[in-house]
Image (spheres, helix red, strand yellow):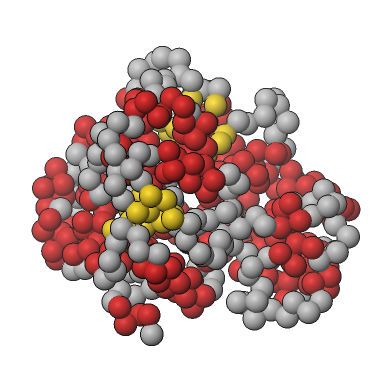
Amino acid sequence: MDFPPLDLALQSRTAEVLERCVACGACADVCPMPAPAGIDTSDTKTLTAGVLTLLRGGDHKDAARWAEVCSGSGHCIPACKHGVDPRFMLTMARLEMASRNPDNARRQTGFAAFGNMTRGVRVLSRLQLAPDLLERFRPESEPDRPAEIVFYTGCNLMKTPHIALLCLDMLDALKVSYRVMGGPSSCCGVLQFRAGDLTTSGRIAYRTIDRLKEAAPRALSWCPTCQIQLGEVVAPARDENPFDMAPIVKFLAERLDDLRPLMIHPVNKRVGLHEHPGVGGVSEAARAILQAIPGLDFVDLEQSRLGYACNSLAPLPAFKRDSHRQQLEAAEAAGVTTLAGIYHACHREFCSHERDWPFEVVNFLELLGESMGLTRPDLFKRLKLMQDVDAILAEAAPMIETHHLDLDEARAVVAKDILSEQPLPLGRATRL
């Protein structure tokens, strides 16, 4: 079946938003982002009406700022009683603003973002993975066999490959037949989408969806960006055979009764969870898994539940720093031994704070793995804790040689994608 180009499909869905939205302001009332962005929320009806003005091609300063800082928390979705997905509405408002740039500029912006991402994923995965482990993430290396699910890694998970390997280890332990897809060759197209290049974004996303559907009847995602982009933005444009993709964290929670007999090792740790509500049910699933681990003392940390991952807070850097500081302070106040995150992007930004605070920082799957006797070393954290480009390159020298990486390129990636990705500076002085 031929599907409409992504731009036409989105125009049709945007027209539905314009028809249904009554600008009641309920979505803005529950959104956590306008206040830290300095947006006047005294009249949320006017603010919401401003988004509709943007979608019709007009201008509205406060609404444009709201769309820019939307972190995808999703609190707005159940708040709407008129059949509108306000998160999608704000996504379309951002797209409208990006689409006002010249075509060539949009293509170049998307191309540059994709190139930077591809370079970071390629180099960082090879700094950490031997060829035999890297091979596990290449679909072409898998045998031609039926699979129950396809595990879709997305792209940036491979910067912290120990998390991806733990996912595969757990699928193996559950005796689930699977295939693996991901990486830049199977991108969700979000970088081109953000730049307003819908032609390229649609081509990439449609192709990825087709490949996922061919690989297995059900896809399990890791990345919240990919889940939202493919599951909420792109897939609804296609009517044939609805695309079945769900977060692997929720899948593991669904199989909790099968996991419990495998959790044979007590994990005697006091654990707090770093959460994001953007993809519904993921935080709840991670909590359920942690609370099922023998010996583990789960602590409900007081925190602002924002966005779909830490990187979704990037448009407000000072607010993001404050939220990170508050999370670390809440963990210390609760006396945890372990601060566990869910997503890979959060782990990259938080893990080096382990140096300065009285608890370890891990991905929550490491704790589940520990209870199951499954371990994968967190090489990303080991490298980041060195806080020195030369020391990191020396540590990774065998992998650099094995994969024939260019040393200058590796140096640039380490500086940018490891050391510079530190929204809250290291050191206890950051508490002041």
Q: Quadrant of the C terminus?
A: bottom left
At 65% from the left edge and 76% from the top edge, which residue is drawn? 35
At 44% from the left edge and 55% from the top edge, which residue is drawn? 299
Locate residue 139: give its quadrant: top left
At 30% from the left edge and 78% from the top edge, which residue is drawn? 428
Q: Position of residue 355 (x, y in %)?
A: 24, 67
At 88% from the left edge and 53% from the top edge, which residue is drawn? 19
Horizontally, is 160 left or right of 89 in the view?
Answer: left
The answer to whether residue 237 is seen in the rendering is: yes
Q: Nearer the viewer, residue 368 or 63?
A: 368
Horizontally, is 336 left or right of 254 in the view?
Answer: left
Name the residue at the bottom extreme.
432
Horizontally, is 121 left or right of 105 in the view?
Answer: left
Q: Position of residue 122 (x, y in %)?
A: 31, 48
The answer to whether residue 158 is seen in the rendering is: no
Locate residue 80: give its quadrant: bottom right
Horizontally, is 207 left or right of 239 in the view?
Answer: left
